[in-house]
């Protein structure tokens, strides 16, 4: 079984005012078995291991994101949030927007869930932008119908789809007042993962301008998370400075940070056979990555990204 990297960093080195990790996972398959239709089989990543990680980095609040390996059964999420403890930790859940009952969604809310992760895998929408719009609308309708002050998180591996999603977001999510979050830099790439003209001019890569417009106008939150999904230059990810600065300069009030602990592999469509095989966690130097971010951000931007912005998004239920 893969070892989960631990970094001996004094508490509060990075977060003397406290801070939020807005995207992490817990996997305890011995207690809560994975879905038989999962897209990935991670090793165990327990609450105890996460608590050690949290304390050593020094952030004080977190948002536990339901692992898609559990499908749309949020029994584990509700239990994990309870064990981590409200109000310090809240949850982002996953539902089947066509089958999950209102009672289950309200039970999730009572358990500390404050948002939903749009599961494109389950709807066969990974490569189909029209299905992505349909799925996003189905999730939105469930939140609106129950008058929940929740957010939606959606990330597409096809960044060019944002050119089509941009007007959809403005037409449907903005009037509904439901915040939309995209994690992992919206899977926009640093130069080390681009080729040709896009490597020389990364702002010309597909979807870049649409994403930045949505951020600029306050229609999209972007999460600085999982740099290893968008750059080959670990552990410091130097070539991500341009993307961090682009997001912050577009709208510093629409940027948040998540660890993506315990660092599952890059997103892709897997065969069922591959999905059933245990996939080890990536070996990530979280401290080196955070130090890079600290160099690129002012004190005000740091406080917004790690404290104020996530508190505005998730604080009402945390």
Image (cartoon, helix red, strand yellow):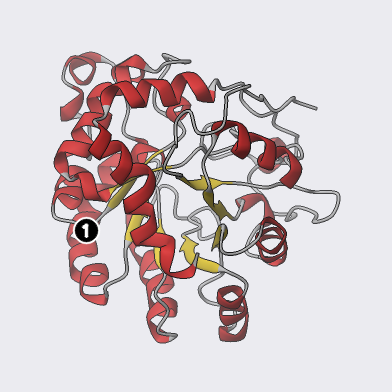
- Residue 107 lies, in percent from the top left, at 62, 79
Residue at image location 80% in from the left, 27% down from the top: 1
Taking the image as drawn, is residue 132 in sight? no
- Quarter of the image where one finds residue 186: top left
Q: Report whether 139 appears left or right of 25.
A: left
- Residue 49 lies, in percent from the top left, at 72, 38
Mark 1 is surrounded, within 10 Å at the Cα level, by few (under 14), some (14 to 19) or many (20 or more) other residues, namely many
Q: Return the residue found at the far right.
A: 30
Q: Nearer the viewer, residue 114 or 95?
A: 114
Q: Report whether 157 appears left or right of 53.
A: left
Q: Nearer the viewer, residue 182 or 3?
A: 3
Residue at image location 13% in from the left, 55% down from the top: 217
Taking the image as drawn, is residue 31 in sight? yes
Q: Is residue 64 above or below residue 298?
A: below
Which SS class for mark 1?
A: loop
- Residue 153 lies, in percent from the top left, at 41, 56
Residue at image mark 1: 219
Label count reads: 1
């Amino acid at each position: 079984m893969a070892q989960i990297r631990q970094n001996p960093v004094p508490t509060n080195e990075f977060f003397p005012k406290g801070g939020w990790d807005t995207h992490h996972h817990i996997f305890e398959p011995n207690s809560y078995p994975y879905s038989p239709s999962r897209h990935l089989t991670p090793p165990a990543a327990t609450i105890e291991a996460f608590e050690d990680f949290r304390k050593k980095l020094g952030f004080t609040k977190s948002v536990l994101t339901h692992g898609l390996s559990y499908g749309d059964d949020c029994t584990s999420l509700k239990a994990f949030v309870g064990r981590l403890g409200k109000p310090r930790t809240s949850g982002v859940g996953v539902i089947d927007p066509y089958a999950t009952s209102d009672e289950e969604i309200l039970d999730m809310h009572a358990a500390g869930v404050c948002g939903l992760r749009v599961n494109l895998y389950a709807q066969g929408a990974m490569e189909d932008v029209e299905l992505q719009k349909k799925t996003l609308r189905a999730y939105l309708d469930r939140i609106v119908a129950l008058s929940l002050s929740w957010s939606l998180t959606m990330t597409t591996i096809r960044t060019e789809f944002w050119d089509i999603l941009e007007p959809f977001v403005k037409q449907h999510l903005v009037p509904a007042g439901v915040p939309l979050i995209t994690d992992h830099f919206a899977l926009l790439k640093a130069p080390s993962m681009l080729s040709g003209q896009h490597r020389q001019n990364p702002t010309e890569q597909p979807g870049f301008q649409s994403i930045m417009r949505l951020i600029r106008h306050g229609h999209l939150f972007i999460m600085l998370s999982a740099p290893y999904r968008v750059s080959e230059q670990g552990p410091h990810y130097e070539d991500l400075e341009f993307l961090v600065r682009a997001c912050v300069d577009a709208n510093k009030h629409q940027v948040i940070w998540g660890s993506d602990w315990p660092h599952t592999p890059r997103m892709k469509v897997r065969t069922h056979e591959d999905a059933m095989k245990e996939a080890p966690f990536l070996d990530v130097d979280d401290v080196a990555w955070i130090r890079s971010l600290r160099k690129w951000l002012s004190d005000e931007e740091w406080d917004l990204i790690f404290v104020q912005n996530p508190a505005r998004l998730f604080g009402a239920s945390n």
